[in-house]
């Protein structure tokens, strides 16, 4: 049976789904705290509690919705696409309603409004994101196709991260009132339109590929009564199954390694703005250019990492990429030492290329861990004969969502420890040194730990290719047997 590689058009349609989802998610992450405190007038700790509750639910809902995705049997949309289609429209509607809160003069009602619609937002996010991630495993079982599909997804993801800044620049230009609610509503409307367009493109752009996969017809068969009873028992054990999954070495390594990598990125992104504003005294325009350098490096490097991983194992490639990020951070830390002796513009032109180098390394971080996790899931499915990609993806996202929450809480404590005062436009030199230590040492320690964790990863290219060859042989025998049965019935 001839192997059907994933064509460019399908990869493009698959990657587009991450543009709308990523842009909407980044908008909420970037603006909801400011919107709640400055536009709706809520106390900061109330908004913080609200976001914490919804983040916790986001993590808990991932394995549940992943399980539902695995058990779905639709002859039209397969396991994943129906959930994604529903979520695209639900997300678009809920997103606009979220920012249209009419209770700006009533703190209690405003908080309830945010809590309810943020919970719905995270639920619909999961209904799209978890099946979307599992879909890649379904349509791209080939070792190299996995990396290419994840790289395409990463490119659109990075564009999604940049999109909120672009929308704010266009819809809330300089001189406009950033405290006016209508500006956020305009951004929400555009984001919702993008989500619908990109969601439809992914669903209907991948549906043909889904139906072509060998496991499609088998997966759509009705369960026997015994299987249904067994399935209900499994549903009640979804969360306990996380512990069993975590005990498996390669599952644990990728989940922990990626989570620690994201902690490093949280240090850079959440405290980096403080560092460049209060220590380097860069303007908002200069900081925007730095962000473009960082994300631009990640986008430009996708072709590089796809070609490197063709020659070397994913583990080796990822460890090298993390070392590149560490090198870039080291260069930025050197500029910090000389910032008091040089002009702001002079230092800026050294920081910009250093962040571009960080971006090149982080480009692999956006795709390779996902591809490695897909390989682990593929190996597990071959051993068990069961397609539990959705549930495993849910466990994966739960792990890094939980670690992100812990990291943000820890960073908040560290900002208090170094005595950072947001009301002061100029921070003292000890505070500036403290901010630098948080960014440089925090990210460097996290990245070093991630390198150590990923070094224990045991799956190699040859292992995955062997499993894929054996799986293709089994599929070919089944197809040949079915053809002979059909021929016999015809006669």
Image (spheres, helix red, strand yellow):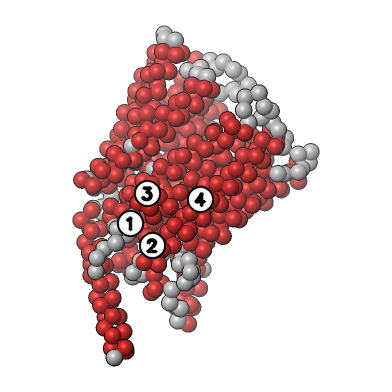
Looking at this rendering, what residue extends furthest in the top direction?
A: 341
Mark 3, residue position: 150
Q: Quadrant of the N terminus?
A: bottom left
Residue at the spot of label 4 = 198
- Residue appearing at x 51%, y 55% in the figure: 200
Q: Nearer the viewer, mark 3 or mark 1?
A: 1
Asked which secondary structure carries label 4, the reply is helix
Q: Is residue 325 above or below residue 49?
A: above
In this figure, which residue is indicated by the disc labeled 2?
A: 209
Q: Position of residue 223 (x, y in %)?
A: 45, 78
Determine which quarter of the picture holds residue 317.
Answer: top left
Please tell me whether residue 268 is drawn above or below residue 27 in the rendered image: above
Q: Earlier in the sequence, mark 3 or mark 1?
A: 1
Q: Residue at x 67, y 51 (%)?
A: 116
Front residue of 312 and 332:
312
Q: Residue furthest front?
A: 491
Which of the marked residues, 3 or 2, is nearer the chain's N terminus?
A: 3
Report the Cα–Cα distance between label 2 and label 1.
8 Å
First of labels 3, 4 by sequence position? 3
Between the C-alphas of marks 4 and 2, the distance is 17 Å
Tell me which numbered mark, 4 or 2, is placed earlier along the sequence.
4
Q: Are marks 3 and 4 in contact (CB under 8 Å)?
A: no
The earlier-in-sequence mark between 4 and 1 is 1
Front tag of 3 and 2 = 2
Query: Residue 256 location, x and y as percent?
Result: 38, 47
Question: Cβ–Cβ below 8 Å for labels 2 and 1?
Answer: yes
Q: Is residue 204 left or right of residue 141?
A: right
Q: Which residue is mark 1?
A: 6
Question: Mark 1 or mark 2, which is nearer the start of the sequence?
Answer: 1
């Amino acid at each position: 049976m001839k192997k059907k590689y994933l064509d460019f058009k399908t990869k493009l349609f698959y990657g587009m789904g991450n543009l709308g989802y990523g842009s909407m998610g980044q908008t909420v992450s970037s603006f909801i705290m400011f919107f709640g405190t400055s536009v709706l007038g809520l106390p900061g700790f109330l908004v913080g509690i609200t976001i914490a509750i919804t983040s916790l639910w986001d993590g808990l809902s991932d394995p549940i919705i992943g399980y539902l995705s695995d058990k779905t049997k639709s002859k039209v949309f397969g396991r994943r696409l129906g959930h994604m289609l529903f979520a695209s429209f639900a997300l678009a509607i809920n997103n606009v309603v979220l920012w249209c809160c009419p209770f700006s003069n009533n703190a209690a009602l405003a908080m309830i409004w945010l809590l309810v619609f943020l919970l719905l937002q995270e639920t619909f996010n999961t209904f799209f994101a978890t099946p979307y991630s599992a879909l890649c495993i379904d349509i791209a079982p080939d070792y190299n196709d996995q990396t290419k599909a994840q790289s395409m997804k990463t490119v659109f993801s990075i564009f999604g991260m940049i999109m909120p800044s672009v929308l704010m620049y266009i819809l809330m230009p300089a001189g406009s009132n950033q405290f006016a609610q209508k500006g956020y509503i305009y951004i929400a409307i555009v984001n919702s339109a993008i989500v619908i367009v990109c969601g439809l493109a992914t669903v209907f752009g991948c549906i043909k590929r889904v139906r072509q996969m060998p496991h499609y017809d088998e997966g759509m068969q009705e369960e026997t009564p015994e299987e249904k009873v067994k399935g209900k028992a499994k549903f009640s054990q979804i969360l306990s199954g996380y512990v069993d999954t975590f005990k498996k070495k390669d599952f644990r390594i990728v989940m922990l390694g990626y989570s620690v990598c994201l902690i490093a990125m949280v240090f850079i992104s959440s405290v980096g703005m403080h560092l460049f504003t209060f220590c380097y005294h860069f303007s908002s325009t200069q900081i925007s250019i730095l962000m473009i350098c960082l994300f631009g490096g990640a986008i430009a490097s996708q072709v590089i990492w796809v070609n490197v991983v063709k020659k070397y194992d994913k583990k080796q490639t990822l460890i090298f990429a993390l070392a590149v990020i560490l090198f870039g951070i080291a260069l930025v830390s050197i500029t910090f030492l000389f910032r008091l002796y040089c002009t702001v513009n002079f230092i800026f032109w050294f920081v910009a290329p250093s962040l571009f180098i960080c971006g090149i390394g982080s480009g692999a971080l956006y795709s390779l861990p996902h591809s490695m996790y897909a390989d682990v899931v593929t190996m597990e499915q071959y051993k068990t004969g069961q397609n539990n990609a959705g549930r495993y993806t849910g466990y994966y996202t739960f792990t890094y969502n939980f670690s992100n929450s812990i990291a943000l809480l820890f960073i908040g404590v560290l900002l208090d420890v170094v005595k950072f005062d947001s009301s002061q436009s100029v921070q003292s030199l000890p505070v500036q040194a403290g901010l630098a230590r948080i960014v440089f040492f925090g990210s460097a320690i996290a990245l070093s730990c991630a390198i150590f964790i990923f070094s224990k990863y045991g799956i190699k290219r040859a292992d995955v290719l062997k499993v894929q060859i054996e799986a293709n042989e089994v599929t070919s025998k089944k197809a040949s047997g079915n053809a002979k049965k059909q021929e016999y019935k015809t006669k």
